[in-house]
Image (spheres, rainbow, N blue to C red):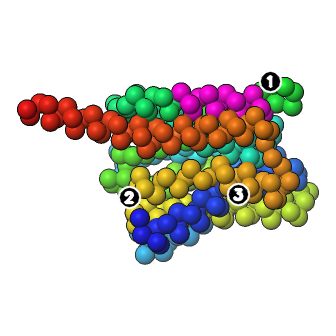
Amino acid sequence: MNSKALLLGLFTVVIWGSTFAANSVSLSGGFSAGHLILFRFLLTSVIFAILACIPSFKIRLPKKEDFWKIMLLGWIGISGYHICATNGQLTISAGTAGMLIGSGPIFTTILAIIILKERLGKIGWVGLGFGFIGILLIAIGSGDTSFGIAPGVFLTLLAAIATSLFFVYQKPFFTRYSAIELTAYCTWAGTIPFLIFAPGLLTTLQTATLEANLTSIYIGIFPTAIAYLTWAMALSLANASSISSILYLEPVIAIIVAWIWLSELPSFLSLIGGLITISGVIIVNFYGKKETIANSHSNKIEQIQ
């Protein structure tokens, strides 16, 4: 991984990690979940529309045979994810939300096994087990009472599953479209369902606090538009698996930003669960897959002999 790709990747993950605290600020400052999502993606859609008019970005129209597939991808990965994730934060802390979203690669791996027929070694399955134990501890530690589970946990886990489906099903499209093109298509498609939240948006913008309005603008410009572009640039400069390893920092950044900005920390049990979950994700993605590759090589050698 070259230094430029590393810097772009780190910048992206820091911005994405700040989203959870920023959502909490806007939600507590007068925005409903629906209005926050709509305002954020209207702003982002306009930004991508402007970029589409710039020849150097080369954002083409999608092919006719891919149109409805991309629309569905946007509805799952953008609409489904953000409706669940934003509403989930109404009852759980920013740090807890970040840790649960950080469990996404576990669901991506399971979906890749089921849908893409990818194989996972024994160590990988152990890692998945660790991941689910961690998720359970995060969930239990999220409630206001001992061993209570906040409702937002289930919505946030649905968001993690939605983004996992998004990552798995978008994979074939990268052979025909650039990362920026696919991001723009999915953003526009995903914004359409959010229009149902349009009634009352102008009133919300007028009555929300100044901090909430400025934060919602920040969310629309930086985590949603700029960060997606810098991530696409990072992917174009480095191996996808290498640059994706930086995503393991996102839950950590989410906790740190929430602590500094909101003076908010997840419960001790949730923190332990988060540590176990991320450990499980690392085991699956680094050691589980390496074991599978090593086993496949051994099988080939045995066949040759």
Please report whichever mark, 2 or 1, sits nearer to the chain's N-terminal start: 1
Q: Residue at x 37, y 31 (%)?
A: 121
Q: Mark 2 points at which residue?
A: 239
Residue 32 in the image: x percent, y percent?
A: 82, 46
Q: Is residue 44 above or below residue 150?
A: below
User: Amino acid under label 2?
Assistant: Asn
Q: Name the residue under label 3.
A: 18
Residue 133 colored in magenta in the image? yes
Give the left or right position of residue 227, taking residue 121 as reference.
Answer: right
Q: Which of marks 1 and 3 is in front?
A: 1
Residue 49 colored in magenta in the image? no
In what element is the residue under mark 1? loop
Q: In this view, does 69 lie above or below 129?
A: below
In what element is the residue under mark 2? loop
Disc 2 from disc 3: Cα separation: 25 Å
User: Amino acid under label 3?
Assistant: Ser
Q: In which quarter of the image is residue 122?
A: top left
Residue 168 shows in this picture:
no
Please report whichever mark, 1 or 3, sits nearer to the chain's N-terminal start: 3
Residue 256 shows in this picture:
yes
Quadrant assignment for the C terminus: top left
Q: Name the residue under label 1.
A: 147
Residue sitting nearer the eye, 260 or 57:
260
Give the magenta range. 129-142
In what element is the residue under mark 3? helix
Residue sitting nearer the eye, 163 or 40:
163
